[in-house]
Image (cartoon, grey):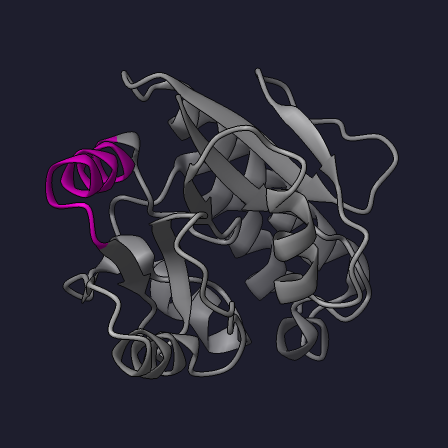
Amino acid sequence: MEAIIIPYRGTASDKSRLRSDLKETSVGKLLNYMTQNLINEVSKIESDVHLYILTKKNNLSFSGNFTVLLDNGDELNESLTNAFKEIKENIITIVMADLPLIKSEEIQKILHKYKTEKKILLGPTLDNGTSILTFNKNNSFPLVFGKNSALRFRDVFEKEAISYEILENKDVYRDIDKFKDLIEIMENNSIPENIKQIIKECVDFE
């Protein structure tokens, strides 16, 4: 069995650039809907995967089959490293919650590609962040999630001589960090209708 981890930290520092343009309630609602959509997509995957939600929240309102991992780190990289010690699976895929265009088929392809090629796979955002990372936790390397993390992960893998592939940049890896991301993603026909409506409310209201 493989593990999929969705970080849903819920701290005031998350999405700071988006929070500077939107009301707190709008950001919270948007993140909630995007995370639930991702949980729904993971549930459609045919492979035998164990879904974990990494969170600081005591209770979650999401529906679906998942296990809660306590987020006890000060920042995401520390939190994930600590979480790896709590799960039995070695093959891990980290999927960021703010990916409204991601589909189960894309995640399935990544899982299959990893099984076949046995090299780290990284899905980049348009601004060189990291949306998806698949790897074996026994192959130790430092996590560098944050600004320009796709480029920094590349540097880490090359320095450590670790086999990896940065996947072709696609719309499905597009995340929402800034207000302009909301505007741009509204034009994509693949966005789920409920998330599209929430984004429209945010854009129109703000």
Q: Residue 206 lies in magenta, yes or no?
A: no
**Left or right, residue 52 beside residue 170:** right
Is residue 11 depicted above or below 20 in this figure?
A: above
Q: Position of residue 156 (x, y in %)?
A: 37, 78
| Residue depicted at 57% across the width and 15% down the height | 65
Give above or below for 151 relative to 89. Answer: below
The quarter in which the C terminus is drawn is bottom right
Q: Is residue 187 visible?
A: no
Based on the picture, tell me whether residue 117 belongs to the magenta stretch. Answer: yes
The quarter of the image holding the N terminus is: top left
Residue at x 46%, y 76% (from the top left corner): 180
State the count of labels.
0
Picture residue at 56% right of the left edge, 64% below the top: 203
Say which quarter of the image contains residue 73.
bottom right
Front residue of 202/45: it is: 45
Judge left or right: residue 122 versus residue 147: left
Name the magenta segment's main secondary structure.
helix
Point out the stretch of residues depicted in magenta. Answer: 105-119
Residue 116 as seen in the image, left or right of residue 39: left
Image coords of residue 77 (percent x, y)? 62, 65
The image quadrant of residue 140 is bottom left
Percent across and percent down for residue 124 are: 30, 67
* Up/down of 183 relative to 35, above or below: below
Q: Nearer the viewer, residue 48 or 16?
A: 48
Q: Is residue 128 visible?
A: yes
Which residue reaches farthest right? Answer: 58
